[in-house]
Image (cartoon, rainbow, N blue to C red):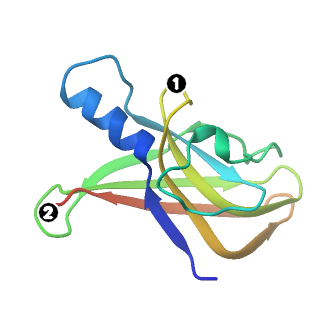
Amino acid sequence: MAQEEVINNEGIVEANLLLMGSTATKINSISLIKTACSAATASGYSDYTQATETGCVVTAIATITASSDSFSGDTIHIEHPFTAGEAATIKGHLIANTDKDVLYSVCCYAGDISMETNDTLTVTHKIRGKNG
C-alpha cells in the first residue's frame, strides 16, 4: 500500500464555518495513529485510534506556516516532532482542530513505523487550497 493523505469532509465543513464567521475552530492539533489506517474523506475524528504512548499523544502543532505551491500562500505547511517516551508502532497521523473533535486531514503511512524510547518522528504535512 502506498502512503495515502486526504482532506476530510469534517475539516471542509469546519473551514467553511470559519469563513462564514460561524462557531468553529482552526487547525491546531496533531496526533499519531496506532491502529489500522485508511484515508477516507468521509472518515471523522473518532474513526481513528490515536496513540496513547508517552510522547505520541494528541498535542498542539509545533509549527504552522504558509507556503506556496501554485501561488503565494496557497498551502498550510505543518511540521511537528514526536519523541517517543516508550515503544510505539505508528500507522499514520491526523490533523485536527483546537477542540480536538474535528478531523481536518489524515495521512496513512505505507507501512508501520516502529519507534523505540527516545526515537523522534518529525511529521511534515501540507494542506493546499486550490481552485477547481
Residue drawn at x 81%, y 42% is: 52
**Which residue is located at x 50 percent, y 34 percent?**
102
Q: Residue furthest top?
A: 23
Q: Give the numbered dot on residue 99.
A: 1
Mark 2 lies on a secondary structure that is loop
Callout 1: 10 Å neighbours few (<14), some, many (20+)? few
Q: Is residue 62 above or below residue 5?
A: above
What element does badge 1 sit on? loop
User: Disc 2 marks which amino acid?
Assistant: Gly
Q: Earlier in the sequence, mark 2 or mark 1?
A: 1
Residue 12 at x, y = what percent? Answer: 34, 43
The answer to whether residue 30 is left or right of residue 52 is: left
Of the two numbered discs 2 and 1 in the rendering, the one whose residue sits closer to the viewer: 2
Mark drawn on residue 132 = 2
State the image quarter where residue 119 is shown.
bottom right
What's under tag 1, amino acid-wise? Asp
Q: Residue visible at 19% across and 64% down?
A: 68
Residue 46 lies, in percent from the top left, at: 65, 38
Residue 78 against residue 54 in the figure, above or below: below
Looking at this view, is 36 or 64 the one in front?
Answer: 36
Q: Is residue 18 left or right of residue 63?
A: left
